[in-house]
């Protein structure tokens, strides 16, 4: 009798195990099929099949949301549904990163919200918006001495330490004028996104890095366009230091003066819009 019971238990256990294996195998197959379908979609349309799918949307507290509404122009331009997605992403970004104050800076909601909102603005067209290469955000009151090249910096991104460092004074200065194409937060976070896109192979990183290669090839093969870029005065000279600074400056211009960008350099504008999957009004 005991042997019969044990045999039945083993049989039930085998059936349950087989069931789990079948479910896991089915999930793997469906995941593979979905990835193949999405890759075909991306190749054709140069954008992810979807960006915003959440079990539930998290909310900032009242003081944090007030900072967004009063100090972050981009947020106020979004339709109500997109505002909810934006708020959720800012909340998640804040929770995911370690904010560290240096030289007397006390980390507060304003620092957390505005830096996080800048990151979310740049990745709003991405499915994965966390910028995985950033784990720490260090904030100084003003310019700080960097051991990287033994000089004073307003900001820097160190991928080895997974650390974004900014001068709060200069970060805030970047938002005082929205059309001067100078924004420290956008600039440094673009570096982080750029390097992260090289390391990661999620769909948004793939679109970003592949489109940047297309843009680079366009500029290499079109001498007239390259010359116009360098002589127009629209992009500051620092853009032509290397490919990383070029992209950071180009995205500063794209965010702050999109209409002028599109008017002067429509070919480049289209590539940057594609890189960011920026399907937002007025862009």
Image: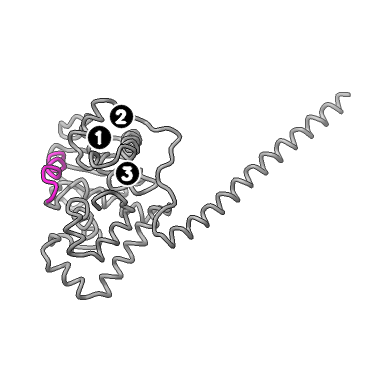
Q: Secondary structure at mark 1?
A: helix
Q: Earlier in the sequence, mark 2 or mark 1?
A: 2
Q: Which class describes the residues within 10 Å of circle 1: few (<14), some (14-19), or many (20+)?
A: many
Q: Which residue does the image show at 18% across and 62% down from the upper left?
A: 263
Q: Secondary structure at mark 3?
A: loop
- Estimate the spatial distance between the alpha carbons at disc 3 and disc 1, rounded to whole Å: 16 Å
Circles 2, 1 touching at the beta carbon (< 8 Å):
yes
Circles 2, 3 touching at the beta carbon (< 8 Å):
no
Q: How is the image coloured?
A: one colour
x and y percentages locating residue 117 in the rendered image: 26, 40
Image mark for residue 113 = 1
- Estimate the spatial distance between the alpha carbons at disc 2 and disc 1, rounded to whole Å: 9 Å
Give the camera-side residue of 160 and 140: 140
Q: Nearer the viewer, mark 2 or mark 1?
A: 2
Q: Quadrant of residue 258?
A: bottom left
Against 265, residue 167 (above or below) is above
The residue stretch that appears in magenta: 168-179
Image mark for residue 189 = none
Q: Earlier in the sequence, mark 3 or mark 1?
A: 1
x and y percentages locating residue 192 in the rendered image: 29, 50
Q: Which residue does the image show at 28% across and 61% down from the upper left?
A: 270
Q: Which class describes the residues within 10 Å of circle 3: few (<14), some (14-19), or many (20+)?
A: many
From the image, which quarter does the N terminus lie in? top right
- Estimate the spatial distance between the alpha carbons at disc 2 and disc 3, rounded to whole Å: 21 Å
x and y percentages locating residue 14 in the rendered image: 75, 37
Image mark for residue 134 = 3
Q: Which class describes the residues within 10 Å of circle 2: few (<14), some (14-19), or many (20+)?
A: some
Residue highlighted by disc 2: 60
Q: Nearer the viewer, mark 2 or mark 3?
A: 2
């Amino acid at each position: 009798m005991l042997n019969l019971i044990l045999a039945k238990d083993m049989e039930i256990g085998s059936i349950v195990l087989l069931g789990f294996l079948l479910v896991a195998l089915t999930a793997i197959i469906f995941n593979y099929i979905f990835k193949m379908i999405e890759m075909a979609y991306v190749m054709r349309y140069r954008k992810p099949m979807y960006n915003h799918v959440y079990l539930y949307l998290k909310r900032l507290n009242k003081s944090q949301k007030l900072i967004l509404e009063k100090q972050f122009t981009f947020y106020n331009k979004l339709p109500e549904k997109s505002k909810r997605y934006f708020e959720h992403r800012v909340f998640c970004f804040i929770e995911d990163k370690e904010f560290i104050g240096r030289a007397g800076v006390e980390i507060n909601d304003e620092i957390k919200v505005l830096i996080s909102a800048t990151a979310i603005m740049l990745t709003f067209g991405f499915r994965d918006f966390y910028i995985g290469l950033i784990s720490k955000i260090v904030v100084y009151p003003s310019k700080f001495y960097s051991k990287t090249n033994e000089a004073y910096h307003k900001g820097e991104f160190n991928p080895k330490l997974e650390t974004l460092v900014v001068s709060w004074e200069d970060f805030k200065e970047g938002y005082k004028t929205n059309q001067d194409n100078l924004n420290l937060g956008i600039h440094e976070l673009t570096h982080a996104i750029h390097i992260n896109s090289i390391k990661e192979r999620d769909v948004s990183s793939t679109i970003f890095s592949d489109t940047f290669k297309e843009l680079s090839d366009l500029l290499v093969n079109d001498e007239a366009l390259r010359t116009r870029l360098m002589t127009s005065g629209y992009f500051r000279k620092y853009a032509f230091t290397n490919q990383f600074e070029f992209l950071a400056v180009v995205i500063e211009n794209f965010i702050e003066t999109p209409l002028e960008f599109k008017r002067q350099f429509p070919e480049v504008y289209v590539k940057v819009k594609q890189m960011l999957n920026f399907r937002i009004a007025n862009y």
